[in-house]
Amino acid sequence: MPRGSTPKQQRNTSRHGGIKTKEMLGKVNSLKNQHKAQMWPYEEQKAALVQKQRQERREQQERHRLKREAIMQTVRGRFRKGVMGFFDKVTGKAERLRLIGRKELNAVKAEHAESRHKTIIQHKHERTELQKHIRQNKERQLEERRQLAKSIQQIRAEQRAEQKHDKLRQGFEDSSLDRGQDKPKQDKDGQAINRARKNRRRRDLD
C-alpha cells in the first residue's frame, strides 16, 4: 500500500473504476441486444421472401407443365387413325400437322422461357431491395458501434489520466510526510550543536 494512502481511499478508487467498467460493459451488451433485435425482422423477411419465391417458382413450373401437356394432347388429337390416318400420311397432311404442332410447342416453350426470365428478374429485384435495407441497417449499426468504441476509449483515457493524477498526488503527499518526519531529527541535531557551542564558550571563559 502506498504511504499516506488509506484503505478507504483505495477502495473508493477501485470502486469508482469498477463502476465505470460495468457501465461500459452494460453499454456494449445493451447495444448488441438492440442491434440483434433490429436485425430480427429482416431475418424474418428474408426467410419469408425465400419461401415465397420458391413457392412461386414451383407454381410456375406446374402451370408450364400443364400447358405443355395440353398443347401436346391437342397436337396428338389432330392426327387421325386407321385408313384416314394412312390417307393423311399419303397426302402430306400428317406432316403439315406435325409442323404446326412443333411450331405451337416451340411458341409455348419461348413463352415459358420469357415467363421464367421475368420471374427471375422480379425475384432478384425483391432480394436486392431487401438486401439494401439490411445493408443500410448494418452500416448504421456499424457507425453506432464505432461511436460507442470511441466513447469507451475516451472514458479509458480519462481513467488513465485520473490514475496518473492520483499517483502524482500520492507521491507529493508522501514526500511532504517524509519532510515532516525528518524535521524533528534536524531540530535535535541543531540543539546538540548549540549546546556544544555553549560548552566551548564556557571553557574559554574559565
Image (cartoon, grey):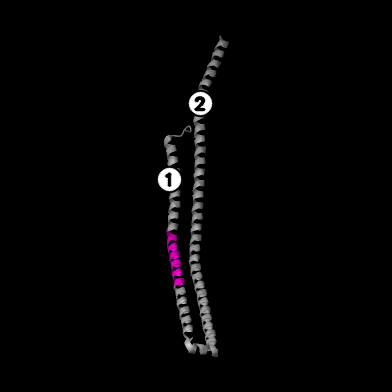
Place of residue 18 in the rendered image (x, y in percent of width and height, measured from the top left): 44, 43
Q: Which mark is residue 169?
A: none
Callout 1: helix, strand or loop? helix
Q: Earlier in the sequence, mark 2 or mark 1?
A: 1
Q: Residue at x 50, y 32 (%)?
A: 174
Residue found at the very far front of the displayed protein: 83
| Displayed quadrant of residue 91 | bottom right
Place of residue 187 in the rendered image (x, y in percent of width and height, measured from the top left): 51, 23
Q: Amino acid at mark 2?
A: Lys
Q: Please say if 154 is above or below 176.
A: below
Place of residue 1 in the rendered image (x, y in percent of width and height, measured from the top left): 47, 33
> Which residue in the protein does label 2 denote?
183
Q: Residue at x 49, y 36 (%)?
A: 170
- Which quadrant is the C terminus positioned in? top right
> Which residue in the protein does label 1 denote?
19
Q: Residues within 10 Å of mark 1 (few under 14, many from 20)?
A: few
Q: Please say if 138 is above or below 21.
A: below
Residue 42: within the magenta? yes
Place of residue 190 in the rendered image (x, y in percent of width and height, measured from the top left): 53, 21
